[in-house]
Image: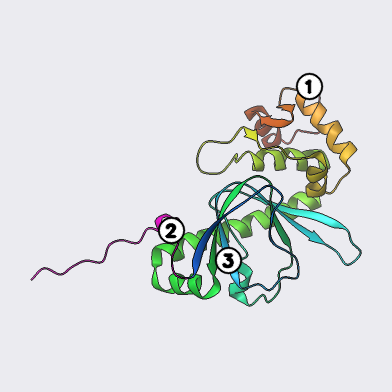
Amino acid sequence: MAIKRRPSFNPKSFLAKIGEGRSISTYRKDQIVFSQGDPADEVFFIQSGKLKVTVVSEQGKEAVTAILGPDEFFGEACIAGQALRISTVAAMMESVIVRLEKAAIVRVIHQEPAFSEMFIAHLLGRTIRVEADLVDQLFNSSEKRLARILLLLANFGKEGKPETIIAKISQETLAEMIGTTRSRVSFFMNRFRKLGFIDYNGHIAVHTSLLNAVLHEQPEIKA
């Protein structure tokens, strides 16, 4: 008698379907997924769209800490015991997001090695990104930080083809992400455009030449 083999587990297929402990929702632009101080009892996965992560200090100062895109998890700190959200996550454009209850994602991590590998790869990638962000803030000029953020938003360095055109993002948001003023961001954006590194007309088109400038430690860029 032939032994019936269990079908292979596909994490992407699992995350594309509604099931026990998981649901899929569409968020409109500016709609909040969760707010700073909310109970932390779910993990989320982005099918499509972009989201902004912000933190507000006790003094009321707001900072953008990350921009998230497709195939990224967020809110995973609840698995490690985080009780309350330490940030606010909101959609920057229409976004499709999978919501996984804490118990559901813990169960699939334990039961499915393929999902565990995918999730661990995400955690390692997030750790590398946080370390790189810290180094960027400590040692790089605001101009180079802006160049790096634009490249990250355009997915340079990630798997797949870069999205050379970035969804509309305000200069205020870019300023909050790199820790400078809007006027400085405007100055740098105009410089990048004059040097042919970007096209900027509401939407931002990032060219490979900007990546070359960062790799060669230039953009304290000389015209």
* Disc 3 to disc 1, C-alpha distance: 42 Å
In magenta, the rendered stretch is: 1-20
Inspect this view and state whether residue 4 appears.
yes
Task: Specify whether residue 116 is painted magenta.
Answer: no
The residue beneath circle 3 is 43
Which secondary structure, mark 1? helix
Residue 83 lies in quadrant = bottom right
Q: Is residue 197 left or right of residue 4?
A: right
Picture coordinates of residue 93, whole percent (x, y): 66, 44
Q: Nearer the viewer, residue 179 or 89?
A: 89
Q: Local crowd at mark 1 within 10 Å, few (<14), some, or many (≥20)?
A: few
Q: Give the residue type at disc 2.
A: Lys
Q: Which mark is residue 194?
A: 1
* Disc 1 to disc 2, C-alpha distance: 46 Å
The residue beneath circle 2 is 17
Inspect this view and state whether residue 141 appears.
no
Q: Nearer the viewer, residue 150 or 46?
A: 46
Q: Give the residue type at disc 3.
A: Val
Which secondary structure, mark 3? strand
Quadrant (top left, top right, bottom left, bottom right) of the C terminus: top right
Q: Local crowd at mark 2 within 10 Å, few (<14), some, or many (≥20)?
A: few
